Image (cartoon, rainbow, N blue to C red):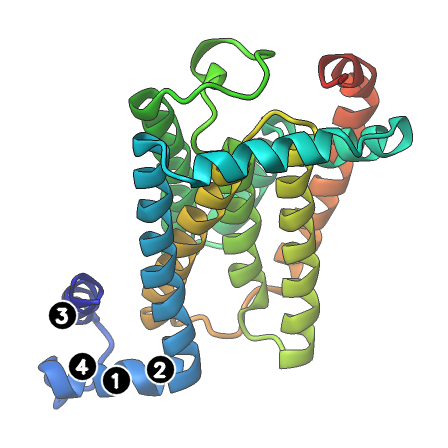
Amino acid sequence: MKPLSMLIRKLLRRLPHMEPDAEVGNEEGWLFVLRRIGLAKLAAAALSVGGGIWLFLGILEDVISGDPLVTVDMMFHKGLQGLRVPLVDHVMVAVSELGDAAVTVPVFMTVLITLLLRREWRSAGYWTVAVASAQASVKLLKFAVQRSRPVSIYEGIEIFSFPSSHATLSIVVYGFLTYLVCRGRRRAAQVRIAGASASVIALISFSRLYLGVHWFSDVLAGLSLGTAWVAFLSVAHHLRDRDTRGFPVLWVVALVTFLTTAAIHIFLHHDVDIVRYAM
């Protein structure tokens, strides 16, 4: 956890709105973080960042070295493919389409424009960095690892499976959006929003396994990497966030965009995707 501690200390040195008499030494800095975030949330964030990175690196090592996790991947893949039925196929294809760029990109752009119109420059910057860096990391990892998919139905860099783009991008886009939307809301509302977001992310991730286009370790690696990144950025943003009231309209804009683009995308591409993902 030493790298995480160093990152937080560097962040604290740049806080512009700390009290004049508050030094950013080890003790004072951590006390400020505890006051700002709270012990429980800070512990959860540290566990998410450290645990996510640790899990991702462990999976990466196993994939490269061909450790027993690869055997689990094969068993998981064969087991799910043996359970497939046409009706569930249609549902899972539709769920998987929720994580396609045709849905996530409009959501990203709409949220970005909304933040810019409200002159929330920092939030817009964090939002852009979160999504852009996640996308770039996935592409770089796919190229570096070059792990073959269970089936060959894609072209270009997407012929490689590790890590899952859908799992990584869905948790970064919908996960960090959940953090932005939940600012200033009551705990009950936060739980409902987080639960709905987690359900969408889990369903998208499972759909990639069910449709047989990813190994289990691909999806798990994407989720762990995305979780660590979202947790770190959320803490970093919150430490310097002055608008703790949040923005109630943001979730309406994001939800309308999500539902509209998802409906259009599924309507236009579902029949083609059913053939693509056929057993």
SS assignment at label 4: helix
* Image quadrant where residue 88 sits: top right
**Cβ–Cβ below 8 Å for labels 1 and 2?**
yes
Question: Horizontally, is 70 left or right of 19 in the view?
Answer: right
- Residues 4 and 37: in front is 4
Seen at 48% across and 18% down, the residue is 158
- CA neighbours of label 4 inside 10 A, class few (<14), some (14 to 19), many (20+): some
| Marker count (numbered) | 4
Question: Horizontally, is 83 left or right of 214 in the view?
Answer: right
The amino acid type, in three-letter code, at marker 1 is Phe
The amino acid type, in three-letter code, at marker 2 is Arg
The amino acid type, in three-letter code, at marker 3 is Arg
Q: Label for residue 4?
A: none
SS assignment at label 2: helix
Marked residue nearer the N-terminal end (2 or 4):
4
* Image quadrant where residue 211 sits: top right
> Which residue is outermost to the right?
87
Residue 73 x %, y %: 53, 35
